[in-house]
Amino acid sequence: MTLYIIPKYQVFGAFIAESWRKGLFGNGQTFVFTVSPEMKVYKWSQKNSHFISAQATHLGFGGPRCALWLDEKLRAGMSGKCDTFDSPPLSKGNFNCYGIELWGFVMPESFEANR
């Protein structure tokens, strides 16, 4: 799944290589990225395994300080320098979301049967 966050004048997000669920999850294929103002990808640094925290109160990517953090209504968030992805803050301070896109891909059963 890929999550795009669109605050004013910026686009950034995260890629998650497994199904979403409540709690802590993710793996070394998870990464965060910026699209605008500049395209940049921040892959797993292997410094820790704090990939995703999906709770009733928030959605966080990375840690111990989140590369990307969204509130429970997915309306506001923040970004900080993150050890998990060796990423700088993805946004310029706290932000309000003007749009969020979530893209998912599902393998057809016929494809899985032929693997």
Image (cartoon, rainbow, N blue to C red):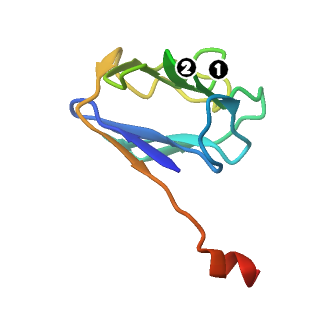
Which element is circle 1 on? loop
Please say if 75 is above or below 85.
Answer: above
Q: Residue at x 48, y 49 (%)?
A: 2
The crowd level at tag 1 (other Cα within 10 Å; few <14, some 14-19, many 20+) is: many
* Quadrant showing the C terminus: bottom right
Q: Residue at x 60, y 22 (%)?
A: 82
- Report the amino acid beneath label 2: Lys
x, y percent for residue 62: 62, 26
Q: Residues within 10 Å of mark 2 (few under 14, many from 20)?
A: some
Label 1: which residue? 63
Residue 51 occupies quadrant: top right
Report x, y in % for residue 41. 53, 45
In the figure, 27 relative to 71: above or below?
below
Task: Say which amino acid is labelled 1.
Answer: Gly
Q: Residue drawn 74% across and 85% down?
A: 114
Residue 70, percent from left and from top: 43, 22
Q: Give the tally of numbered discs.
A: 2
Residue 100 is labelled as none
Q: Pick whichever, 95 or 107, lies toward us.
A: 107
Q: Are marks 1 and 2 in contact (CB under 8 Å)?
A: no
* Alpha carbons under labels 1 and 2: distance apart: 9 Å
Q: Residue furthest bottom?
A: 114
Q: Secondary structure at mark 2?
A: loop
> Left or right: where does residue 49 sit relative to residue 55?
right
Which residue in the protein does label 2 denote? 81
Q: Nearer the viewer, mark 1 or mark 2?
A: 1
Q: Earlier in the sequence, mark 1 or mark 2?
A: 1
Does residue 26 appear to the left or right of 2 in the view shown? right
Q: Position of residue 28 (x, y in %)?
A: 73, 43
> Position of 110 compared to 60: left or right?
right
